[in-house]
Image (cartoon, rainbow, N blue to C red):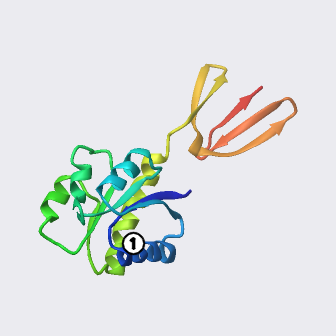
Amino acid sequence: MKVKAIIIEDELPARKTLNSYLKRYFPQVEVTGEAIDLESGVELLENGTYDFVFLDVQLKNGLGIDLIKNRKDLRVVFTTAFDQYTAEAFKSKAFGYLLKPLDPNDFKDIVNRVIKDVLVTNTQLVKLKVTTKDGYAFIDTTTIVRCEAESNYSRIFTSDNKSYMLS
């Protein structure tokens, strides 16, 4: 599964480093957009497709942290050369706070945490309703081990050693 990220960063070398680290360490992450200031950042946050955001705290035309003040639904990794915004960043429930120049180990730790959260959140529990002799059973689809055809019937086997016959 592809995980989508956007980058809101005004410094070209920092954007290049983020892209390079993602390609090197996380090929499953696709950068779907980049912004270099507050205006393009707002546009990207409103209209972009993404699972998480790399956000520079201090952009040339204002504070990046202002972009997310009223948005609690975002997964944000702050990137900055300034550590005075740490407390405010974590009040906004940031996944991480990376100081420039970026440390590859810190980067990997934080992005791994974000990806794990994205995958857990995006995994929806799906149940299959099947008719049984006693009524209905609801099978968690993640427990299905195999299905076998038996003439005009199908049998579903689950990891809890149960089987269900379907017509």
In the picture, the quarter occupied by the C terminus is top right
The residue sitting at the right extreme is 151
Q: Is residue 84 above or below residue 50?
A: below
Left or right of 42 on screen, residue 19: right
In percent of the image, x 55 and y 37: which residue is there? 126
Left or right of 17 on screen, residue 141: right
Quadrant of the rendered structure where residue 13 is? bottom left
In percent of the image, x 54 and y 58: which residue is there? 2
In percent of the image, x 15 and y 64: which residue is there? 85
Q: Tell me the residue that label 1 is attached to.
A: 15
Q: Give the percent coordinates (x, y) of residue 146.
A: 70, 46
Left or right of 42 on screen, residue 147: right
In percent of the image, x 34 and y 67: which residue is there? 110
Q: Give the percent coordinates (x, y) of residue 147.
A: 73, 42
Question: Which one is in front, 153 or 78?
Answer: 78
Q: Give the percent coordinates (x, y) of residue 165.
A: 72, 30
Q: Amino acid at mark 1?
A: Arg
Question: Which one is in front, 18 or 108?
Answer: 18
| Residue 160 visible somewhere in the drawing | no
Q: Is residue 162 above or below residue 60?
A: above
Q: Give the percent coordinates (x, y) of residue 153.
A: 81, 30
